Image: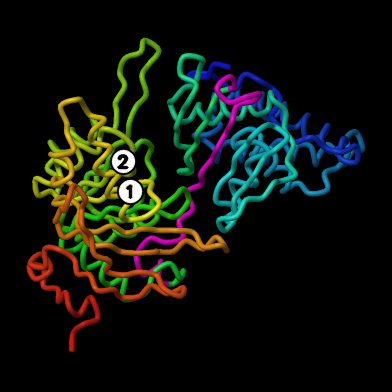
Amino acid sequence: MAVSPASAYADTRAPHPRRTSAHSSHDALVDGLDATLRELVRREGVDPQRDADVVRRLAERVVRRHDDHSLTGAVAPLADPDAVVGELLARVSGFGPLQPLLEDPTVEEIWINDPTRVFVARRGRHELTNLVLTRAQVDELVERMLKSSGRRIDLSRPFVDAMLPEGHRLHVVLEGISRGFSAVNIRKFVLRAARLSDLVELGSLTAQGASFLEGSVRAGLNILVTGGTQAGKTTMLNCLAAAVPGGERIVSAEEVYELRFPHPDHVALQTRQAGLEGTGEIRLRDLVKESLRMRPSRLIVGEVRSEECLDLVLALNSGLPGMCTLHANSAREALVKMCTLPLLAGENISDRFVVPTVATSVDLVVHLGLDPRGQRRVEEVVAVPGRVENGVIECEPVFVRRDGELRRAHGTPPRPERYERVGLDLRRLLGEAG
């Protein structure tokens, strides 16, 4: 399968799940209306995904004509015209059988292991759906999704990360790399928390912890957000970024746009894959370097995975406040990984340089986790005072979760003068005043 953004909606059949015989007449009826609507879309020169409102008006016109024609007895009437309009929109302008899952606010993620096994995640738990597709339907869905993103997938590049129109993140592994079928994953953009106070209401963070983290952001401390997959790292980073004072300029760099937070001066950058000629690729490391030329007051990197960690550490060490996320099992392991990734940048980079540089560049580590019920929560907040002993970065727990509650520990954050500079009482933030 080769997919390019230039592919058009030339087909006259939309993907839809298999139906039982009881629904065959309904399917045949909707298929006919689908073909009529697609013909109108082509005739009008409408882009189905960019002009969804126009497609809706055309679908309503097609359904209304059918209803009028059914009064003569020549065609069967529609039991629910509004539902048929919605189904036509899902087929032509949306993503067919996946559209109801994409519109379901309780669904956090969708993935297709093979056409007969479509899973979703709700509240951190996995569920197998009753949706059954075909190989052709999955291929067409991938093509339709990539059409709006400007990215491609083919035998020379069998992986792709892309953003869907609603902000959902799409990842596809082509058949041949994935055994038997193309593997599709859609991580939905579900905004349940926009600020740290929202995390308190959700039970992920205590009020005292939220006040401390908000004050630390205002003070300009460098914060590393860590955790496993689906632990809520991007949500936490969004909430932390929302606490940045409005007078500062933020530049963010990501593989795919995922950060969304209210700020008057924010420039978002994302990577770009190589073109058909193998040129034009923009890596995350390039974006980190480029962002330093854009007069940032804060630098935010969506997720650090490779050699771009070196450029980020150098930027943070130069006095530019910043934040990023990192996959790790604990705050201490995150610091070890932060010291390992820069070594991928070249043979002339040694741990004798990296370890003390990381120790003086990272101020706080916020580690997140999932409890057995699928609840996302902050497990620990660790301070990095900047000391290194026998090649190991020392750290002090500021907050730790004990007996199911996030409680104050003995550690204190570094750079207390930064809190004073912005008029914050660090002892009060830590609950020690008075």
Magenta span contains residue 230: no
Span highlighted in magenta in the image: 175-200
Determine whether the residue tagged by mark 2 lies in a helix, strand or loop: loop
Q: Residue at x 28, y 72 (%)?
A: 211
Q: Residue furthest top?
A: 277
Numbered disc total: 2
Determine whether the residue tagged by mark 1 lies in a helix, strand or loop: strand
> In the rendering, at what x and y percent does residue 401 appear?
40, 70
Specify how the rendered protein is coloured: rainbow
* Front residue of 269 and 62: 269
Per the image, the residue denoted by label 1 is: 325
Q: Callout 2: 10 Å neighbours few (<14), some, many (20+)?
A: many
In this view, 199 is above or below 16: below
Identity of the amino acid at label 2? Val
Among the 4 quarters of the image, the one containing residue 422: bottom left
Q: Which mark is residue 304?
A: 2
Magenta span contains residue 183: yes
Q: Quick check: marks 2 and 1 in contact, CB under 8 Å?
A: yes
* Front residue of 294 and 181: 181
> In the rendering, at what x and y percent does residue 187 appear?
51, 44
Compared across the picture, whether 374 is left or right of 192 comes to right
Q: What type of secondary structure mainly makes up the magenta span?
A: loop
Q: Is residue 249 visible?
A: no
> In the rendering, at what x and y percent does residue 243 appear?
26, 62
Q: Residue at x 28, y 46 (%)?
A: 336
* Front residue of 265 and 115: 115
